[in-house]
Image (cartoon, grey):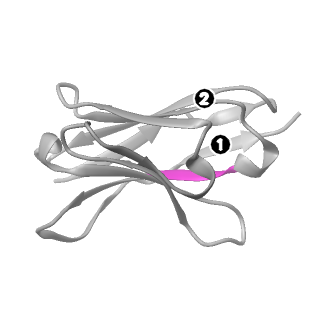
Amino acid sequence: QVQLVESGGGLVQPGGSLRLSCAASGINFSSYTMEWYRQAPGKQRELVASITASGARPSYYNYGKGRFTISRDNAKSTAYLQMNSLKPEDTAVYYCKATHIVIVGGYWGQGTQVTVSS
């Protein structure tokens, strides 16, 4: 059974930092591209960052540019999203997703809530 479990979310003040983790099981983690998405209330889910299977090529989209860093540890089957200089508009549920060229739709985690507020 495939499981992606996000953790590390919570309440943080503006300007603060959080590191999200996504622990995978049931897949050959080192073969999957990992992606982080977020969904704010009333908005569509949007891609924030992705990283290739080897970890050699991180990419950032939308609001993920400049303040967020994606990484992975294939030995631990875990992906990370380091978020710095957080703003209230970063408040959202953050999801990780494992994608593979032969897997239609990929696999999603359950999400972790990030709230940026003073």
Q: Are marks 2 and 1 in contact (CB under 8 Å)?
A: yes
- Residue drawn at x 72%, y 36% is 86
Q: Please state which amino acid type lies under the numbered disc 1.
A: Val
Residue farthest to the right, as pictured: 118
Single out the mark in the foreground, 2 or 1. 2
What SS does tag 2 mark? strand
28 is within the stretch colored magenta:
no
User: Is 117 in front, or is 59?
Assistant: 59
Q: Please state which amino acid type lies under the numbered disc 2.
A: Leu
**What numbered label is drawn on residue 18?**
2
Q: Residues within 10 Å of mark 1 (few under 14, many from 20)?
A: many
Stretch of the chain drawn in magenta: 91-95
**What numbered label is drawn on residue 114?**
1
Q: Position of residue 70 (x, y in %)?
A: 43, 37
Q: Is residue 117 left or right of residue 21?
A: right
Residue 74: quarter of image:
top left
Q: Closer to the N terminus: mark 2 or mark 1?
A: 2
- Residue drawn at x 71%, y 49% is 91
93 is within the stretch colored magenta:
yes
User: Is 87 in front, or is 20?
Assistant: 87
Residue 5: quarter of image:
top left
Q: Position of residue 64 (x, y in %)?
A: 57, 48
Q: Main secondary structure of the magenta part?
A: strand
Q: Is residue 50 left or right of residue 107?
A: right
Q: Residues within 10 Å of mark 2 (few under 14, many from 20)?
A: some
